[in-house]
């Protein structure tokens, strides 16, 4: 009776993985059932089989059980029988009361002679849980290593973060005017002079000005040909289908972004990227921010030393490339995290390419995501410059666009089958995951 | 904005066998055409190199024949063995070589080349030397494929000669006045070999001699990719040779109910002197990947955003020529055309293409442009990047497709840093974006130069770009080969 309840529980879990379950109605030491691996997407069966030995229990707590583990001692005769077969065998401890199950691959577990001698299996209650998350591990166990059998990726809800930061606020109007002077360079320096105090959110093309600042007002009005000043609804530019206007508007947004971050960041025109300014004494600069859930920090400017020396080789600045793009009627800043390297905090280092490709060999998905989240936080939250700056009135961001995906990856199972040198890189502190608001 | 997932497309191999993976597909089902009369049964190589490189390559090919053990790894699907080849094996084409078909370059000649101080001159002279030997062998013994077994010393010298100008001193200003031409050994060799009867293959010392695997594993500057394992190297060389010997190793799986389709890739290149001239190239494929090369007319730059495009009449001519070539190969016209272009289409250009479609009575056409500059990316909250096949639609026409990424079959992400997805726009299409993306994903697997299936570009775009790199070395009136095997 209890035995059958255990089998029922296992069957339910196996079917939940999309696999097939064949009970054998086995004798005492024999096998209770077979799992056949099947592609949930195509319903194709593989003839890859795992034998299952079930041990059901009603006990709420086993004699050796702690909060994290418990032991199970196998009979020598059973073990011999299980281990001599030609198929993989798993042992499942099914708790019919709490409807929990734990599993172990017997041939793998007892390949260690010491364990074989003890006949004991120590179950880790977290790691060895037999539920639908064990799907990938069962596939790895059942499918012969060189067979080339393939299945559709695992159905699993996963969140994907894009690098598109939504623009949440833009001004209502843009202003246009022809400059009073036809000399473009004169007009440019006049505008710049005013902009130094009031902001550089304008662009000049020949003698035409496009601006977020009200050009009817002093001192802006002083450089404009009065009769030509016009106020437009922003959508005439922000939602225009004319390529020329789209380009002008992106240009204006770029100037606005530059102005918004100028306390903390420099912009490199050649590389077209924003990067953290050095500290005045060239010491490490740390940026503190909320990584959605938890306070965290990152060294965004730091020196690197020459080998076996106290001399500084170069400085590394956290950086990003930003590209404004319009999707339907919304604007986004597409953020590409990267680094900038200088000799002295200011001059570009001549080996920047080598430094960059060096770090790109070490950084993976989670490291780059961490930087992306930092930049998103930096751009969402008000400036942290040494002096108080009012928040940019023209440009606000709210959040990175997110998506729900129907298929996913079992990171832990994949990590187990990686070669050692890859594991070393993936588990490096650099590739620690940023902390997100708890979803679960 | 929305997101979707595309399953890994299967390929068709011998006896209608299917697999998503190229190497397992070939191992389990043999090459697609193995039982046809046209399939290459035995490929005769003509080797040109130094005594050392010829001997090294011959020894390695002999080793490959027996089979190469898989790399020691916990990733058996990513690093399978190379099973060896022979008449009765699943890789039935044998590879043969013979001293009578070899051309040995003396160490004296190499010494002379090594004295060269100028990189371009060195490349030019090396190419001339190899072509001269090739021509002699080609005429005397006519092997199926000519192999350039480049010695390590020349390769190193090509990469080590310093730039003539001091890069510290305002390089931008200098370039403006006098554009510096940088020759590429591989592309120049392919261009010059166009006058030979048979295709060529460059084999670097690193391919067959693990000890030579120092830092030089590419003839291209700054393109040192991580070193491949030995079995993968054997797979790649074998497959490229099979294709070059006129075999078809695999093809796209085609539902007979679907329309017969002609795939065309259009790309642009600058002439060698970097003068304004831009010329387009096209690559025409069917599902077997039988590539035919076409040289298009002169392109222009759009006033708005400086993107290259074809004037209407040239666009019409290009497509008409493509149809003519397709008809010559297949005796009939396709029912559907898929045109992949490396820049945006402009209305004038679309009109030109439409004219050609109307004239030939081809009803269904898909115009898709690719954008290399796009930087939209997705991140999983995990150790691994998104899966290959992740498909994001920004709006109705603009889409992001992960052609590189995590791969379920390999249980890993076989790449560096984070993958860069492909961005494309459906400019004027009949099919759904998802179906067109699925087709693009399948076309990434039609690359005969590589047997790891997760290539980033569809072969249409990749081949068109690659062909452009070679065509820039060919004069307008020079002889041009039509088959893709002369360009890869």
Image (tube, coloured by chain):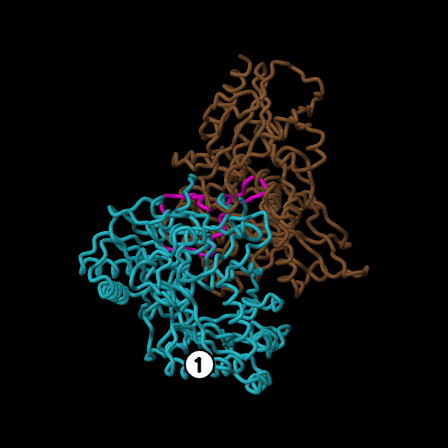
Chain colours: A brown, B cyan
Q: Is residue B441 visible?
A: yes
- Above-or-below relation of A356 to A39: below
Report which residue position mark 1 lands on.
Answer: B100
Query: Which of the 4 image quarters holds residue A68?
Result: top right
Q: Is residue A257 left or right of residue B275?
A: right
Q: Quadrant of residue B321?
A: bottom left
The image shows residue A200, relative to residue A233, as above or below, that is: below
Secondary element under disc 1, as helix, strand or loop, is: helix
* Chain letter of disc 1 in the image: B
| Residue located 33% across and 73% down the image | B481
Q: In the picture, which quadrant includes the C terminus of chain B?
A: bottom left
Residue appearing at x 50%, y 25% in the figure? A33
Question: Which residue lies at the image location 72% right of the left edge and 46% below the top edge?
Answer: A286
Return the residue found at the far top. Answer: A1
- Residue B437 visible, this orientation: no
Q: What span is in magenta?
A: B369-398
List x then y, in percent, for residue A387.
70, 45
In this rendering, the answer to whether A176 lies above or below A76 is below
Main secondary structure type of the part rendered in magenta: loop
Q: Is residue A353 left or right of residue A64?
A: left
Is B260 in the magenta? no
Q: Residue B52's spot in the image, x, y percent? A: 57, 77
How crowded is the residue under tag 1: few (<14 C-alpha within 10 Å), some, or many (20+)?
few
Q: Is residue B461 left or right of residue A102?
A: left
Which is nearer the eye, A262 or B425?
B425
B475 or B84, which is in the foreground?
B84
| Depth order, front residue of A197/A373 | A373
Quarter of the image with the N terminus of chain B in it:
top left
């Amino acid at each position: 009776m209890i035995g059958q309840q255990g089998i029922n529980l296992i069957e339910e879990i196996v079917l939940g993985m999309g696999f097939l379950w064949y009970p054998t109605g086995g004798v005492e030491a024999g096998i209770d059932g077979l799992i056949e691996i099947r592609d949930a997407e195509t319903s194709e069966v593989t003839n890859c089989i795992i034998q299952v030995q079930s041990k059901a229990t009603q006990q709420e707590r086993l004699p050796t059980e702690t909060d994290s583990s418990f032991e199970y001692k196998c009979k020598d005769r059973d073990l011999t029988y299980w281990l001599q077969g030609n198929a993989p065998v798993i042992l499942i401890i099914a708790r019919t009361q709490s409807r929990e199950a734990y599993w172990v691959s017997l041939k793998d577990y007892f390949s260690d002679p010491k364990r074989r001698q003890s006949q004991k299996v120590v179950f880790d209650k977290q790691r060895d849980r037999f539920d639908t998350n064990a799907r990938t591990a069962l596939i790895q166990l059942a499918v012969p290593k060189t067979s080339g059998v393939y299945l559709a990726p695992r159905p699993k809800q996963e969140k994907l973060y894009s690098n598109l930061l939504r623009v949440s606020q833009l001004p209502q109007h843009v202003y246009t005017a022809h400059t009073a002077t036809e000399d473009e360079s004169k007009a440019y320096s006049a505008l710049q002079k005013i902009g130094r105090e009031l902001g550089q959110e304008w662009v000049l093309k020949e003698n035409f000005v496009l601006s977020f600042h009200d050009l009817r007002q002093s001192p802006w009005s002083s450089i404009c040909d009065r009769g030509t000043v016009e106020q437009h609804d922003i959508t005439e530019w922000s939602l225009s289908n004319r390529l020329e206007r789209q380009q002008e508007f992106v240009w204006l947004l770029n100037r606005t972004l530059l102005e918004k971050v100028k306390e903390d960041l420099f912009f490199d025109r050649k590389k077209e990227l924003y990067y953290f300014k050095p500290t005045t004494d060239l010491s490490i600069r740390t940026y503190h921010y909320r990584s959605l859930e938890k306070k965290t920090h990152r060294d965004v400017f730091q020196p690197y030393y020459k080998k076996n020396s106290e001399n500084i080789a170069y400085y590394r600045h956290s950086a990003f490339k930003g590209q404004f793009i319009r999707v339907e009627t919304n604007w986004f800043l597409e953020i590409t995290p990267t680094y900038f390297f200088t000799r002295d905090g200011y001059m570009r280092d001549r080996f920047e390419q080598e430094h960059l490709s060096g770090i790109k060999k070490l950084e993976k998905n989670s490291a780059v995501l961490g930087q992306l989240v930092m930049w998103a936080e930096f751009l969402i939250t008000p400036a942290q410059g040494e002096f108080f700056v009012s928040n940019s009135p023209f440009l606000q961001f709210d959040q990175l666009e997110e998506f729900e995906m129907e298929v996913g990856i079992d990171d832990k199972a994949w990590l187990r089958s990686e070669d050692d040198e890859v594991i070393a890189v993936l588990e490096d502190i650099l590739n620690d995951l940023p902390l997100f608001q708890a979803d679960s | 904005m929305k997101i979707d997932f595309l399953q890994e497309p299967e390929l068709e191999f011998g006896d209608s066998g299917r697999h998503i993976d190229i190497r397992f597909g070939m191992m389990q089902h043999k090459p697609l055409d193995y039982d046809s009369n046209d399939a290459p049964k035995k490929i005769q190589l003509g080797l040109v190199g130094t005594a050392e490189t010829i001997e090294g390559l011959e020894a390695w090919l002999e080793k490959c024949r027996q089979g190469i053990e898989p790399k020691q790894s916990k990733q058996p699907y990513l690093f399978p063995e190379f099973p060896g080849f022979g008449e009765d094996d699943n890789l039935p084409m044998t590879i043969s070589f013979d001293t009578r078909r070899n051309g040995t370059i003396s160490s004296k000649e190499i010494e002379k080349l090594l004295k060269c101080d100028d990189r371009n001159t060195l490349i030019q002279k090396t190419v001339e030397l190899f072509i001269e030997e090739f021509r002699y062998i080609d005429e005397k013994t006519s092997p199926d494929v000519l192999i350039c077994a480049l010695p390590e010393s020349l390769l190193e010298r090509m990469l080590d000669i310093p730039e003539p100008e001091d890069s510290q001193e305002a390089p931008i200003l200098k370039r403006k006045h006098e554009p510096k031409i940088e020759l590429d050994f591989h592309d120049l060799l392919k261009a010059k070999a166009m006058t030979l009867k048979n295709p060529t293959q460059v084999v670097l010392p690193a391919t067959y001699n693990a000890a030579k695997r120092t830092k030089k594993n590419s003839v291209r500057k700054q393109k040192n990719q991580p070193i491949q394992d030995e079995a993968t190297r054997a797979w790649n060389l074998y497959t490229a040779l099979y294709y070059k010997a006129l075999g078809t190793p695999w093809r796209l799986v085609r539902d007979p109910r679907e329309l017969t389709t002609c795939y065309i890739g259009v790309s642009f290149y600058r002439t060698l002197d970097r003068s304004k001239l831009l010329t387009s190239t096209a690559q025409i494929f069917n599902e077997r990947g039988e590539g035919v090369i076409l040289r298009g007319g002169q392109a222009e730059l759009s006033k708005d955003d400086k993107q290259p495009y074809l004037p209407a009449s040239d666009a019409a001519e290009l497509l008409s020529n493509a149809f003519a070539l397709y008809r010559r190969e297949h005796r009939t016209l396709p029912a559907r055309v898929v045109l992949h272009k490396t820049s945006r289409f402009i209305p004038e250009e679309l009109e030109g293409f439409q004219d050609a479609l109307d004239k030939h009575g081809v009803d269904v056409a898909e115009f898709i442009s690719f954008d290399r500059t796009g930087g939209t990316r997705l991140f999983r909250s995990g150790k691994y990047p998104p899966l290959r096949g992740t498909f994001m639609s920004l709006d109705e026409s603009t889409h992001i497709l992960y052609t590189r990424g995590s791969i379920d079959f390999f249980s890993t992400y076989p790449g560096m840093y984070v993958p860069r997805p492909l961005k494309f726009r459906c400019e004027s299409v009949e099919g759904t974006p998802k179906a067109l993306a699925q087709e693009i994903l399948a076309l990434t697997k039609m690359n005969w130069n590589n047997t790891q299936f997760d290539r980033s570009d569809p072969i249409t775009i990749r081949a068109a770009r690659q062909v452009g790199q070679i065509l820039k070395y060919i004069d307008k009136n020079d002889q041009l080969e039509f088959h893709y095997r002369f360009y890869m």
